Structures are given as structure tokens and as C-alpha cells.
Amino acid sequence: MPLVPMRQILDEARKKNYGVGAYNVNNMEQVQAIMAAAKETQSPVIIQASKGALKYSNFTYLKHIMFAAVEENPEIPIAVHLDHGNSLATVKEAIAIGFSSVMIDGSLMEDGKTPSDYAYNVAVTKSVVEYAHKYGVTVEAEIGRLGGIEDGVGSGSIHLTDPKEAEKFVKETGVDALAIAIGTSHGAYKFKGSKELAFDVLKEVRSLIDIPIVLHGASSVPQELIDAVNKYGGKMPGATGVPMESLKKAIQLGVTKINVDTDGRLAITAAIRKVFAETPEKFDPRDYLGPAREALKGVIAGKMKDFGTAGHSGDYKGVSLEEMKAIYK
Ligand code: G3H
Ligand code: 13P
Ligand code: ZN
């Protein structure tokens, strides 16, 4: 049961009005930390790998680590998701290695940087939906554009979602979940001034479409993590994120999937810096990767509680990808 289509996790969460974090992973310690948090809080979970993460791990290493999580946690519903897929070819690679869910980010061209137009986004998303649904695989797409550039993901300019365009896009593509832009951006420097999100846009989109809504760029960049990074030699002045209260409000207003990468990176970096600063004689990677894993587990478990995911790992009947294929027909 543990590998489930993401659509199922999000549909169950929508029925009960809680959010589900989608946590980015690149290595074994991150996957272990997220799964330990899911187990401790009894939460369904989405683990996601970007194209960059797959490339970093030669695909095969991360694939085996992600599926080790599935094998090790039979009681936790897990969706294994491709984050910011940039083309049908990338999506095909992810599905070939067993992912139960993919994102096609057609808000940008294949280079992951250049803004695209609506027609391109519809065409590439439709081609992915047509391909992925044959395998029972869930498809997330994006309309509007986030700010922030993170290693090739993001155009640097925010373009809030037009709710009417979102409605049209969902009808034209048949996508399962929709990422919208309401003022967040990727990375650790999200706001220069006000941290206000465009909740009016979210409300209108929610009233016009009937599929799960996704919020990217949803790390909170907690001040205590920034302080810890800076205290032990880091340099991250002016880092800001989305306050947890805003995320809770977004969930109430209809966001179901919440993407988090940066906060995990901060937790890991703070913990490793602390070990290096306090015990410079240490050189066994386990002496700093172990504490980093523990710190990440704490941060993710906190989010699972705050998003309302905790306690919901038993909500699932366990629709398999095979059964999902029939649903899509
Ligand atoms: O949305 C972007 C995620 O934070 C992944 O970032 O492309 O550096 O792996 P990455
Ligand atoms: P953050 O940079 O806010 O963690 O966002 C991550 C994200 O949206 C991954 O797709
Ligand atoms: Zn993202």
C-alpha cells in the first residue's frame, strides 16, 4: 500500500481540510529524516525530487533511496513525485523509474528560466497528462509564475495567477493538481517588504476549480534557523519566508499541497555548522550528517503538525497505480 498516487493523498486531505507537505530530497539523510517525521506523527507524505536532484544522484541513487523509504514504511502512504519537470522527456524518465506523480512546470520553457506563454503551457501539460494517466500517475501543473531563482527553477519575476485563466487551463489540460502564484517565491529571500499573500486570488481560484491547489515557495525561513546558521559562521542577512500563520490560512482557504525545500536546507546547514564550530576536531561524516538528519526530522515533524497532516496516515484505502489507471479512463 505505501506507494500511492499523489492524487489520492491530496483528495483525502481536501475532504478533511488539512495540508500535506511535499518535501524535497537529494540524499539518504533527507529521506530518512522525512520518513522518521512521518512515522512519528503518523502522516501521509509526499517526497519529491527536482530534475537537479535526480541529476546530482545520477537518477539511480536517489531512486533507490526514495523507494527504500517505500519499502521500509508499509504503514505510511507515500507519493514519490517529480518536482518542476521541464519536459515530457523528463516526465517519461521519472515514470520509467517508478514515480507515482509528476509536475510539469510549463510556466517556464524547457530551460526552466524563460517565461512561456499560455499556449505552450497548455500544450506541454496536455501531452504530459495524456502520457502519465496511462500509468495511473498524477500530474501537477503550474499557472502564473513564482519569483526567485533556484538553480534553474524560476524566472525571477512574479506573475500572479489569473483565476479565469486557471479555470480555463484546468478544463483544457485535465490536470490533477494546480500550482498557483499568490506572491511566494523559491529560496530563502522571499519578501523585500510586506509578506502579504494574494489570498483574494487564492479564494477566487478555489471557487472556480475543483482540483487540489499547490503552493510552491512555501518555506517559512524561521528566524531561529537563520540565527543558528549565522551564529556558526553563515552569512544570510535579510532571509525571509512565508509565516506559518499565512500557510495555515492558505490551507483553510483551499491549498492542499505545500512545497518545502529551503527550510530543510537551513535545518541541515545550521546543524552541520554547529558541529563544525563546536567540535572542529570531528571529521567522521556521521558526526555531522547524523545531527543534521535529527534536526531536519524535528523541522518536518513540526510542519506535519502545523499543516494538520499528523494523525492522518490511516485515511487511505490504498488505491494502487493500477486502480488509478481505471479511474483515469
Ligand atoms: O523548487 C525548487 C526546489 O527547491 C528544488 O531546487 O532545483 O535546486 O533542486 P533544486
Ligand atoms: P521553498 O524554496 O520555499 O522551500 O520552496 C520549495 C518548492 O517550491 C519546491 O518546488
Ligand atoms: Zn517549486
Image: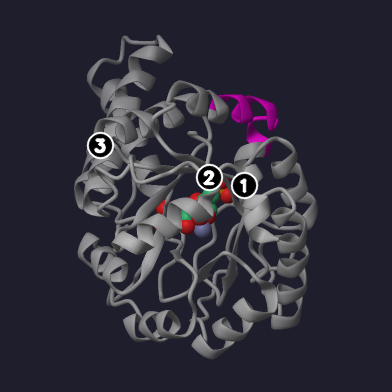
> How many labels, in total?
3
For the residue marked with disc 3, what is the amino acid? Thr
Q: Is residue 247 left or right of residue 224?
A: right
- Residue denoted by label 2: 319
Is residue 179 in view? Answer: yes
**Within-10-Å neighbours for mark 1: few <14, some 14–19, many 20+:** few
Q: Name which residue lies at 29% across and 22% down.
A: 291
Q: Position of residue 60 (x, y in %)?
A: 68, 27
- Residue denoted by label 1: 323
- Residue denoted by label 3: 41
**SS assignment at label 1:** helix
| Front residue of this view, candidates 282 and 71 | 71
**Within-10-Å neighbours for mark 3: few <14, some 14–19, many 20+:** some
Is residue 198 positioned above or below 35 on the image? Answer: below
Q: Is residue 60 magenta?
A: yes
Proximity of marks 2 and 3: CB atoms separated by less than 8 Å: no
For the residue marked with disc 1, what is the amino acid? Glu
Q: Quadrant of residue 106?
A: bottom right
Q: Is residue 262 left or right of residue 247?
A: right
Span of residues in magenta: 55-65
- Specify whether tag 2 is near ligand 2 (CB below 8 Å): no
